[in-house]
Image (tube, helix red, strand yellow):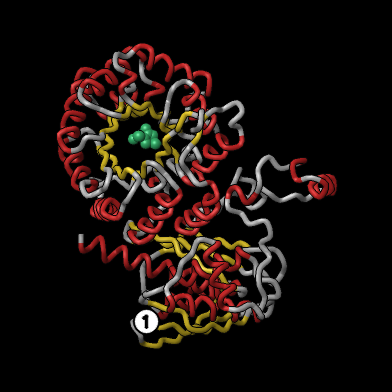
Amino acid sequence: MSDKDRILIFDTTMRDGEQSPGASMTHAEKLDLADILETMGVDIIEAGFPASSQGDFDAVSEIARRSKSSVITGLSRATEKDIERCGDAVRHAARPRIHTFISTSPVHMKHKLQMGPNAVLEAVGRSVSYARNLVEDVEWSAEDATRTEFDFLCKCIDAAITSGATTINVPDTVGYTHPDEYGALIRALRETIPNSDKVVWSTHCHNDLGLAVANSIAGVQNGARQIECTINGLGERAGNAALEEIVMAFKVRGDTLPFETGVDSTRLARASQMVSRITGFPVQYNKAIVGKNAFAHESGIHQDGMLKNTETYEIMKPEDVGVSKSSLVMGKLSGRNAFRDKLKMLGYELDAESLNEAFRRFKDLADRKKHVFDDDILALVDDQLSAMGERVAFRSLRVIAGSQGPQTADLTVMVDGEERTGSSEGNGPVDAVFNTIRKIVSHEAKLDLFQVHAVTGGTDAQAEVSVRLKGEGIMAVGRASDPDTLVASAKAYIHALNKLEARRLKSLAA
Ligand code: KIV
Ligand code: ZN
C-alpha cells in the first residue's frame, strides 16, 4: 500500500483546451484522444460542452459510450437546458458526471451575467439540484473564484454542497493568483464551509502569469484532491496547468510532495505529440517534460557529466515520460516484424492493411533517408492515418523554384476518385503550390497559418508542415510530413481542406 495521497487527474484538453483560438478538433480526433487519455489512466475526461454545438454533443456522447474506466463529463452553464443536454450526452458512460458552473466574482456577475448575488446564489442551488436528479456525480465550479469575495464564495459553495455536489472546483479563471494565496484560499474554504469533508476539492488554474502548475500543487498541499489540467497546457489564452508537468512533479518529488496520480507517465510524450498534431500547435522546444530539448544536452561540460553519470544533469529518465533512450531506429534492411514491434512500442496497433501501407512508406523513406528515427516513424504513420478516406488525395508534384522566376507548380490530385491536374505560378514555390490547389479544387477558405519544422536533425530530415484554413466561420488544421518541404506543404494544405469540408458538411447537417 502506498502512503501517498491519491490525486485525481481531470483532463479538459477537449473542452478548455479546445476553447483556445485555432485549436479545434474533429470528432474522430476527439475519439482517438479520449482513448489515449483513458489508457494512460486519466481519472476524469471532460470531453466537451454538449450544449455549445451538435458536434460537441456527439463527441461527448460517443466518448461516453466507449468509455470503460474513466469518468466522462461535459460542461454546462447553470440552466436546465444546458444541464439536460449534458446529462443526455454523458448518460451512457460507465461513470457519468455533470459539471455545471456559474460566475461568482463581482466583475463577472455585473458585466457578464448581469445578475445580482442573490440570483446567482439561487441559481447555484437550483442548477446543482437539477443535475443531481440526472446523475449521482455532480461537479460545481465557481467561475472566477479567485476574484470572488470570500464570504459570498463560501455561501455559494455551501449551497452547492447542500444541493448535492460531489466535487467543488475553485477556478483561477484569469490566472491571477499565486501559490501562497491560492493554497490559503483552498485551506480557508475547507475550514470554513460545513461538510467540506464530504466533497472532493478541485483546482482549475489558468496560466496567465505562468503559475498554473505551481498554483495547482499549492491547492493540493492544502487539501485539494483533484487537479484540472490539459495536455501541453492547452487552454484559453495562456492555457491551463500542463498535465504532464503535474504528473511528473509528483513522481519526481515524492520526497516532499507525498501525492501520486494514476497516470502512466510513459505515455505522456505520445499524448503530447498527438495533441500537437491534432491542433497544429507546436510544442515549445524547451517545454518541461515533453519539449524536444527536455532531455537534450548540448554543452561539452553537460555532455561530459552525462557520460559519467546521467544523474549529473537529469532528474528523470527520458523513458519515464515515454521518450525512448535511443531513438535511432532502422534502415532499409529492417524487416516487417521489427517495424511492427517498433510501432507497438510507439503506441500504434495497426490492422493488417494499414500496417502494410505504413511499412511500404517506411521502406520508401528509408530509401531516401539514411537514418530513420522514431520521430520520423511517428510523423509517417500520423500522416497516413490522417489522410485515410479523404475526398481530395495528393498524387504528385513538380515545382520550379530558385532565383530565376517565375516559380511554378504542376500538381496532380484525386478528387472523389477522379484525377485532376493543374499548374500555377506564385510568389515563391509554396505560394505556387497553394495557388495550384486553389485552382484545381475551388474553395473560399483563407490560409490562416503556415508553419514548417524539421522532424529530426540533418539536411535530409523530413519537413513537418501545419496549415490552418479558415472559411465560413470554420477552422481546420492540416498536417503532413515529407523529406520534400513542398510536397509536405501540398499534403498539409489538402489535409486541412478535407477537414474543413468534413466540418462544413457536418455543421450543415446539424
Ligand atoms: O476557467 C474556468 O473558470 C473554467 C470553468 C468553466 C471551469 O473553465
Ligand atoms: Zn478554464
**Left or right side of 68 for 185:** right
| Identity of the residue drawn at 30% across and 42% down | 73
Question: Residue 352, image x and y in percent?
Answer: 44, 77
Pick the residue in front: 338 or 111.
338
Q: Check the image and report above or below for 43 versus 57.
A: above
Which amino acid is tagged 1?
Answer: Val
Pick the residue in front: 497 or 15.
15
Question: For mark 1, does the 10 Å Cα neighbourhood hold few (<14), some (14 to 19), or many (20 or more) residues?
Answer: some
Question: Residue 70, image x and y in percent?
Answer: 35, 45
Question: Residue 111, image x and y in percent?
Answer: 30, 27
**Left or right side of 419 for 284:** right
What is the quadrant of residue 248 in the picture?
top right
Which residue in the protein does label 1 denote? Answer: 415
Q: Is any atom of residue 402 visible in this view?
A: yes
Q: Secondary structure at mark 1?
A: strand
What is the quadrant of residue 375 in the picture?
bottom right
The C terminus is located in which quarter? bottom left
Q: Check the image and report above or below for 414 versus 119.
A: below
Q: Is any atom of residue 237 visible in this view?
A: no
Mark 1 CB near ligand 2 (8 Å cut): no
| Identity of the residue drawn at 42% across and 62% down | 469
Q: Check the image and report above or below for 41 versus 156.
A: below
Question: Residue 229, image x and y in percent?
Answer: 45, 39
